[in-house]
Image: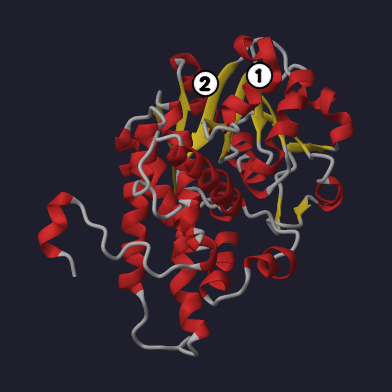
Amino acid sequence: MLRIAVLGAGVMATALTFPAVENGNEVRFIGTHLDDDIIDSIQATRQHPVLELKVDERAKAYHFANAAEAIEGADVIMSGVNSFGVDWAGRQLAKLAKPGQIILCVTKGMQADEDGTLHILPEVLKKHMGNLADEAHWAAIVGPSNAGELAVHRDTRVVFCGEEQEVRDRLVAAYRTDYYHVWTSTDFVGHEVGACMKNIFAFGGGFAAGMLDKAGQTDAKYVMYDYTAALFGEGARELKQMVAFMGGDPEVATGLGGVGDMFVTTMGGRNVRARTYVGAGVPFSQIRNVKMKGITLEGVAAIGVVGEAIEKLTRRGVIAETDYPWCAPSTTSLLTMLPSICPGRSSSAEKSDVG
């Protein structure tokens, strides 16, 4: 049995409380300063207002004002704050964490230095924690996992990453159930990079629907699966390339932490709505400020961070201009939808069969 403190009361952090409490762990989840309404609802009725499900009564909910109490004596601190709040989360962990605790990361994305050098988010947390980071044990959860499906016990398969075998074993024992299936890996970097990049490339999954809406062909018999598949294939290629560039095992891109996660993200959720609007030609400023105001769009954040970094890395000669057409800023095409990201590109094995 582990004592698990969860920082953040978003849908995924909350969904992960289900297998944890069902395995007999003590779970305390802590809303951020922006989650007061969620915590109020759970404390009063057990209902999570966004997930629209009742949270197991064995999972105790705390307002952030009581974070120190909730984290006291915890074996694990899960960082479940979204990518927009990762710097804030790092500053809180610097004050609240203790040596020897496991820091379990579920937030996905990357950050970049001024020169375009990219960092996975666990590195960002470590930067804020200073020397304390070296006294913690680090792990992460990646892979195709829809929060609602997990919470209602649909079969879900994920990867727990960590460099220490003992830490991986403890976490697997704490979370694995007959519906939450867990694989393990030591490739922290590869999986974290894949978890970020899949959000960028999955953004293309809804473009076709939006383009059909714009053309007045919402109910067309023949849709645009061919086009979507071409985008998906290019995304898979670039994801694998980025994993290798960042120092991970490129084979990660072919599994749960790569195309598996990319597939589930293309199938539903907030990014689907956003990219459908984009495909229909809605200006992104209107999507962000009107159509989806107040909704966290981590895929969009990843596009901005990685796209700008790729521009800088290209100028420095670190990567070639043609390496990442999906998210290079000259193809701000991701936000305005340039229909020609893929046509004309082919691997050497495909050059005789370009259509």
Count the numbered circles shown.
2
Label 1, secondary structure: give it: loop
Which percent across, then down, holds residue 187? 40, 26
Residue farthest toward the left in the current orientation of the protein:
352
Assess disc 2: are there few (<14), some (14-19) or many (≥20) residues with their C-alpha within 10 Å of its C-alpha: few
Does residue 61 appear left or right of residue 56 in this picture? right
- In this view, 4 is above or below 53: above
Residue where numbered disc 2 is placed: 170
Residue positioned 84% across, 52% down in the render: 41
- Quadrant of the drawing holding the C terminus: bottom left
Amino acid type, callout 2? Arg
Label 2, secondary structure: give it: helix
Disc 1 to disc 2, C-alpha distance: 10 Å
Residue where numbered disc 1 is placed: 75
Residue 165's image quarter? top left
- Quadrant of the drawing holding the N terminus: top right
> Depth check: 57 or 133 in front?
133
Residue positioned 45% across, 29% down in the render: 189
Does residue 133 appear left or right of residue 275 in this picture? right
Work out whether residue 28 can be spotted: no
Instruction: Verify CB contact (< 8 Å) between mark 1 and mark 2.
Output: yes
Which percent across, then down, holds residue 302? 56, 47
Residue positioned 72% across, 13% down in the render: 98
Which percent across, then down, holds residue 58? 73, 37
> Depth check: 317 or 39 in front?
317
Does residue 251 appear left or right of residue 272 in this picture? left
Q: Earlier in the sequence, mark 1 or mark 2?
A: 1
- In this view, 325 is above or below 26: below
